[in-house]
Image (cartoon, rainbow, N blue to C red):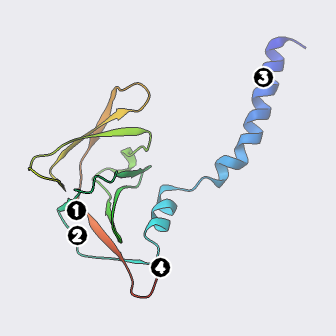
Amino acid sequence: MSRLSSLAIAATAVTLVASPASAERKSGEEKLAEMIDGRVAGEPQSCINTFQSRPLTVIDDTAIVYRSGDTVYVNRTRAPETLDEDDVLVIRKFGTGSRLCRLDQITTRDRLTGFYSGNIFLTDFVPYERVEGTR
């Protein structure tokens, strides 16, 4: 058997072994549902306070999420299908202080190469708060 054939067989075996793990991978909507489980959506807000320096969480193809205490803020952006958790967010704020607003400019950079990979256009932030009696 040639070396090329051996490599092809090995690659096929790795693909077959990796397939079940990929099938178990959760979708962005499933991840978001877990994050807001037991919470109720509140009134959408154009800005949120981010003074606690907690990181924004990017959920692939779904939303940007910010946690503050018991509140989870969800921003589905204008084009959520462009969200990639492997990208780094670069934020240019228009206001002063620690507020993140829907008019702030966000570009993305590839985490490995540092190259520009796109723009993110925010929409309103929807706060999700725990329902009384759930934890």
Are the residues tagged 2 and 3 within 8 Å (C-beta)? no
Question: Which kind of residue does numbered mark 3 sit on?
Answer: Ala
**Residue under circle 1?**
124
The residue furthest top is: 2
- Neighbour class for label 3 at 10 Å: few (<14), some, many (≥20)? few
Q: Nearer the viewer, mark 4 or mark 1?
A: 4
Question: Which kind of residue does numbered mark 1 sit on?
Answer: Asp
Report helix, strand or loop for mark 4: loop
Report helix, strand or loop for mark 3: helix
Dot label at residue 44 = 2
The location of residue 62, given as percent across then percent down, is: 40, 55
Q: CA distance from mark 1 to mark 3?
A: 49 Å
The location of residue 55, given as percent across then percent down, is: 34, 51
Question: Is residue 130 placed above or below 46 in the rendered structure?
Answer: below
Are the residues tagged 4 and 1 within 8 Å (C-beta)? no
- Describe residue 84's horizontal placement relative to residue 2 as left or right: left
Q: CA distance from mark 4 to mark 2?
A: 23 Å
The residue furthest right is: 1
**Residue under circle 3?**
8
Q: CA distance from mark 4 to mark 3?
A: 50 Å
Q: CA distance from mark 2 to mark 3?
A: 53 Å
Are the residues tagged 2 and 1 within 8 Å (C-beta)? yes
Dot label at residue 135 = 4
- Describe residue 133's horizontal placement relative to residue 17 as left or right: left
First of labels 2, 3 by sequence position: 3
